[in-house]
Amino acid sequence: MKKILTAAILLVILAQILSAANAEASASTPPEFVVADAYKVYYEILKAAIDEHGVAKKMPEPEEGECTDACVYEEFEYADDWELSYAELIDFGNDGLPSLLYVSSYGMYKYCYIYGYSEGKTVLYLTWLSGSPSDITAPQGLGGDNFHGFEIATDKNGVKYLSVFMHWKQLEDEYYTVKNGEWVAVLTRDYSLNGEDNWGANWYVNGNLAEKNTYDRAPETELGIVDTRETPDNPDAVYAVLAELAEKAGVVMDGN
């Protein structure tokens, strides 16, 4: 009898644990109507960006023999202003509510825009200019005349991060994701050169002095990053994301 009661108690405790876990998961997953609202807003944002800036046009591929190995093939025909060259829906943080990422390009420069949806309103999480910018709008007002870029990083659990980086300045890179509806920096790596002759460097992880090996491996050890990729140049993705947003939000597309 004692064994039966013990087993029954264990089953009750297990059921309570599972129930709490399911409730927590349910609470952290946004309702379908919230996701649909976000898609509708994202559709309007992306459509407005397309209407204002246009989408980069693909150049016709060179005929056989027309372009040798030494030839530089220009894949896109850029206008005299910024044009959209890529778009993607990314569920940063794996919270069930994707963010809208789109890229506008001008020559070798790229602007990355990321929009989120929190508490019934749209939030511009970040804009980041890749290239050699004179101005940048980013958290903490970081910027300068140096090379900047951005990449999408993924950890071992599938959580996505935006890695923004800057070379030859104090800031080396930062990793951002979404937590509780907010865009947050979860890892910062930077360095400073020593002395007037810049001989040697001090390395920092999250503001703390660290060994070079610790600094180099921080994305893997601190966040579990297993993959990093660039956003490709793919104008077709812009229209594909617009169509996906329209379908999921129940929006009738008008001419796009």
Image (cartoon, rainbow, N blue to C red):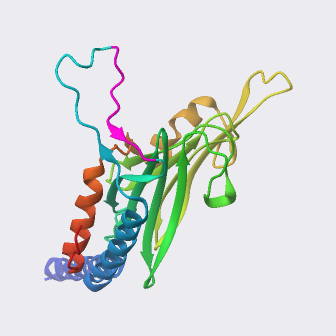
Quadrant of the image for the C terminus? bottom left
> Could you say where residue 67 lies in the image, as x and y percent from the top left?
26, 19
Rendered position, 116 above or below 207: below
Rendered position, 46 above or below 120: above
156 displayed left or right of 123: left
> Could you say where residue 183 lies in the image, as x and y percent from the top left?
51, 65
Task: Please state which of residues 104 and 122 is positioned toward the viewer in this rendering.
Answer: 104
Total labels: the figure holds 0
In the rendered image, which quarter is residue 14 located in?
A: bottom left
In the rendered image, which quarter is residue 141 located in?
A: bottom right
Rendered position, 120 above or below 152: below
Q: Which residues are magenta?
A: 70-79
- Based on the picture, tell me whether residue 78 belongs to the magenta stretch: yes
Quadrant of the image for the N terminus? bottom left
In the rendered image, which quarter is residue 228 located in?
A: top left
229 displayed left or right of 246: right
Task: Please state which of residues 201 and 123 is positioned toward the viewer in this rendering.
Answer: 123
Rendered position, 175 above or below 62: below
Task: Please state which of residues 224 and 37 is positioned toward the viewer in this rendering.
Answer: 37
- Based on the picture, tell me whether residue 163 belongs to the magenta stretch: no
> Could you say where residue 92 lies in the image, as x and y percent from the top left?
39, 61
Q: Residue at x 69, y 44 (%)?
A: 144
Magenta span: helix, strand or loop, mainly? loop
> Could you say where residue 7 lies in the image, as x and y percent from the top left?
17, 77
